[in-house]
Structures are given as structure tokens and as C-alpha cells.
Image (cartoon, rainbow, N blue to C red):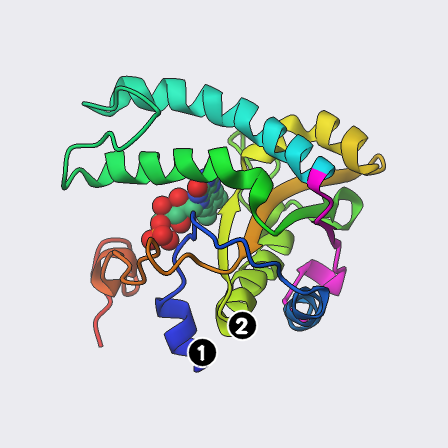
């Protein structure tokens, strides 16, 4: 698949078919993703490919715990989001639709063919913004280049994928469940499967370049 096409048509996939994903495909994706950039080329990323049904169920349960926390906040802020069962959004309410899709995704997570738990070896990270008195942005930089490559690799294979970071908040439990040693952080979960053609959209809504890129100083739109 042409790279720019892949970049422009890679939505979060929340609905999958039951068809399994072969290990060879996931291996191929990881084999290409590993050429991502990392600070000092330390390559501290580590991925646990979870396909065992019991373990997937336990990972999904941990994810759901954090989704429940998130949804309580979201429900307060999203008008009309009133329940979690059935078709429950006013037509055209994009935020609500997204919540519904994500809620469905959470409910079906254990049945997604492969759950990729993306971790990083903390000692490999040079966190250059750690003394700025705000949350670090740089910290994850040397993991998420790899993760984005995984998402694009999935698209190239015709697979759907969805990235979530909720699992990171359950790190101690995830570590116990998957045998992750000390010094390794959980950075993301990527669910991978074949997209359900009935439910999967491909047209993405994103801001134009002029709104997100500036020339020379902040605020002057960067145009072609
Ligand atoms: C850091 C990060 C965290 C995310 N967390 C979740 C999540 O917990 N659950 C989920 O369904 N999608 C999650 N997403 C996916 C976004 O919600 C999604 O990319 C966004 O809504 C745009 O949707 P689209 O890519 O399908 O257009 C996350 C994406 C990022 C980059």
C-alpha cells in the first residue's frame, strides 16, 4: 500500500470479525516497525503479543476498569450520553458516537484476535523535559514512534487496529499478569484484527495543516 494512502486511511478500528490473525503477519509488522527511531537508538520498546483467550480476558478486564473511570468523567461532559447498552446516541453527535464505539470496543476487547501490549525499558529513555515542572511529553517519544509504525503496518496488511493507553494506569496488575519485570513501563495497548466491513469507516476527520503548523513563529499558518 502506498505510504500516504496508509497514513490517511488508518482509523481506530473498534469492530472486528472473528477471523484469527496469523502469527506470521504480526511478526512481519513488528519486523518492519522495529526500524522506528528511538533516542540514542536504544530501542527500549518491548511488545507482548497476547493471543491466549484467558489472558486476553484478563487484559480486557483491566482495560475496562480504567474505561469505567474515564466514562464517568465523559458522561458528565457529554450531553445526552445516558446509557451503555444498545444504540444510544442522537444522530450526528460525533462525540457521543465516538464514546459509543469506544464503549463497544471495550466490551468486545477480549475477543479481538491479538492484543499487543507495548512496553518500554525505562532506563533507555532520556527524558529531556523532566525538570520543567509539568507532565513529560518526551518520555514516551522513544516508544510511540514504534507504536505508530505498528499501526501503519496493520493498515498495510489490511488489518484494523486501535490504540489505547488506558491500560498503562493498571501497570502493576498488567505486570503481574504478563510477567513484566521491574523497570519496564506499559505504554499502550494495540488491539489488532480484521475490520468488520459493516461497521468500519475509513474517512477520517482531521484539522488542516494551516491550523496545526506555523511558519517561523506560533500562529502564522504554514501554507504551501
Ligand atoms: C494516546 C491515545 C490514546 C487513545 N486511547 C483510546 C482509548 O482508550 N480507547 C479508544 O477506543 N481509542 C483510543 N484512542 C484512539 C482515538 O480515540 C482515535 O484516534 C480518535 O478518536 C480519532 O479516531 P479515528 O482515528 O478513528 O478518526 C487513543 C489514541 C491515542 C493517540
Front in this rendered view, residue 57 or 2: 57
- Where residue 101 appears, as percent x and y from the top left, is 35, 40
Left or right: residue 189 compared with residue 214 = right
Front in this rendered view, residue 128 or 162: 162
Q: Quadrant of the C terminus?
A: bottom left
CA distance separating discs 2 and 1? 12 Å
Structural crowding at the residue carrying mark 1, measured as other residues with C-alpha within 10 Å and reported as few (<14), some (14–19) or many (≥20) = few
Q: Residue 108, relative to residue 39: is it above or below? A: above
Q: Secondary structure at mark 1?
A: helix
Front in this rendered view, residue 1 or 15: 15
Q: Quadrant of residue 206?
A: bottom left
Magenta stretch holds residue 42:
yes
Q: Residue 22, relative to residue 170: is it above or below? A: below
Of circles 2 and 1, which is in front?
2
Q: Earlier in the sequence, mark 2 or mark 1?
A: 1
Quadrant of the displayed image that contains ligand 1: top left
Q: Secondary structure at mark 2?
A: helix
Front in this rendered view, residue 4 or 157: 157
Residue 129 appears in the rendering:
no
Q: Quadrant of residue 166?
A: top right
- Where residue 15 appears, as percent x and y from the top left, is 43, 49
**Which residue is tagged 2?**
157
> Which residue is rendered at x = 74% and y = 26% of the image?
172
> Which residue is rendered at x = 26% and y = 64% of the image?
209
Q: Residue 200, relative to residue 132: is it above or below? A: below
Single out the residue that lies furthest toward the front.
Answer: 18
Left or right: residue 20 compared with residue 159 = right
> Which residue is rendered at x = 48% and y = 68% of the image?
155
Left or right: residue 57 compared with residue 97 = right
**Which residue is tagged 1?**
3
Residue interval drawn in magenta: 35-53
Amino acid at each position: 500500500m502506498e505510504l500516504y494512502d496508509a497514513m490517511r486511511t488508518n482509523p481506530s478500528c473498534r469492530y472486528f470479525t472473528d477471523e484469527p490473525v496469523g502469527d506470521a503477519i504480526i511478526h512481519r509488522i513488528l519486523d518492519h516497525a522495529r526500524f522506528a527511531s528511538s533516542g540514542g537508538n536504544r530501542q527500549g520498546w518491548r511488545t507482548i503479543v497476547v493471543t491466549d483467550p484467558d489472558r486476553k480476558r484478563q487484559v480486557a478486564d483491566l482495560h475496562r476498569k480504567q474505561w469505567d473511570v474515564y466514562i464517568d468523567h465523559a458522561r458528565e461532559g457529554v450531553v445526552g450520553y445516558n446509557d451503555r447498552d444498545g444504540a444510544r446516541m442522537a444522530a450526528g453527535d460525533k462525540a457521543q458516537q465516538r464514546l459509543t464505539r469506544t464503549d463497544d470496543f471495550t466490551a468486545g476487547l477480549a475477543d479481538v484476535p491479538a492484543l499487543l501490549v507495548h512496553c518500554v525499558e525505562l532506563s533507555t529513555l532520556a527524558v529531556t523535559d523532566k525538570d520543567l515542572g509539568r507532565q513529560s511529553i518526551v518520555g514516551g517519544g522513544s516508544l510511540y514512534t514504534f507504536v505508530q509504525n505498528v499501526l501503519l503496518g496493520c493498515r498495510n496488511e489490511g488489518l484494523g487496529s486501535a490504540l489505547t493507553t488506558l491500560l498503562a494506569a493498571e501497570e502493576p496488575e498488567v505486570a503481574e499478569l504478563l510477567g513484566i519485570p521491574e523497570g519496564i513501563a506499559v505504554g499502550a495497548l494495540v488491539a489488532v484484527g480484521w475490520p468488520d466491513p459493516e461497521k468500519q469507516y475509513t474517512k477520517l476527520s482531521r484539522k488542516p495543516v494551516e491550523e496545526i503548523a506555523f511558519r517561523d513563529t506560533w500562529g502564522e499558518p504554514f501554507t504551501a
